[in-house]
Image (cartoon, rainbow, N blue to C red):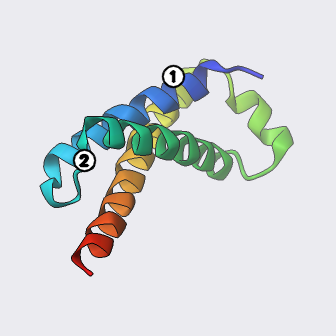
Amino acid sequence: MNIVPLIIQLATGAVGGNIAGALLKKFNLGPLGNSIAGIVGGGLGGQLLSLLTSGGSAAAAAPAAGMDPSSIVSSLVGGGVGGAVLMAIVGWIKSKMSSS
C-alpha cells in the first residue's frame, strides 16, 4: 500500500476546504474548522474518486496507487474537491442549525 496518494489527498483537502471557506463566507467555519472538514472530505473524496476511476475493484485499485502522473492528478483533484464539498456541506448544516 502506497500512502503518498492519501497524504496528497489529505493536504489538498485542507487547502480545498480553506479555499471554499474563503469563497463561501456564509458557510465559513474558520481556518481550523475549514481545515478539519477539508482533511476529512479530502480523504473521503480522494478515495472515492480512486475507486470510481479504477473500476471499483480492489485488484484494479492496487496498480492505481502508484506515483504515475495520472494518479497524482487524481489525488490532487479528488482531495481538493472532496475537501471543498464537505466543508460546504458542514457549513451549510451549521448555518441552518444556528438560524433555527
- Label 1 residue SS: helix
Q: Position of residue 78 (x, y in %)?
A: 48, 42
For label 2, the residue is 20
Mark 1 to mark 2 CA distance (whole Å): 25 Å
Q: Amino acid at mark 1?
A: Pro
Q: Position of residue 72 (x, y in %)?
A: 51, 25
Q: Which mark is residue 99?
A: none
Tell me which residue sits at (75%, 28%) in the image.
Answer: 63
Tell me which residue sits at (47%, 37%) in the image.
Answer: 39
Q: Is residue 51 left or right of residue 38?
A: right
Q: Position of residue 50 (x, y in %)?
A: 62, 43
57 to 80, vertically: above or below: below
Q: Which of label 1 and label 2 is nearer to you?
A: 2
Q: Between residues 40 and 77, which one lies in front from this camera angle? A: 40
73 to 94, vertically: above or below: above
4 to 83, vertically: above or below: above
Look at the image and tell me in which quarter the N terminus lies: top right
Residue 83 lies in quadrant: top left
What is the total number of numbered labels drawn onto the structure image? 2
Look at the image and tell me in which quarter the C terminus lies: bottom left
Marked residue nearer the N-terminal end (1 or 2): 2
Q: Which mark is residue 69?
A: 1
Q: Amino acid at mark 2?
A: Ala
61 to 23, vertically: above or below: above
Q: Is residue 87 left or right of residue 23?
A: right
Crowd class of label 1 (few under 14; some 14 to 19; many from 20; radius 10 Å): few
Residue 71 lies in quadrant: top right
Tell me which residue sits at (53%, 48%) in the image.
Answer: 45
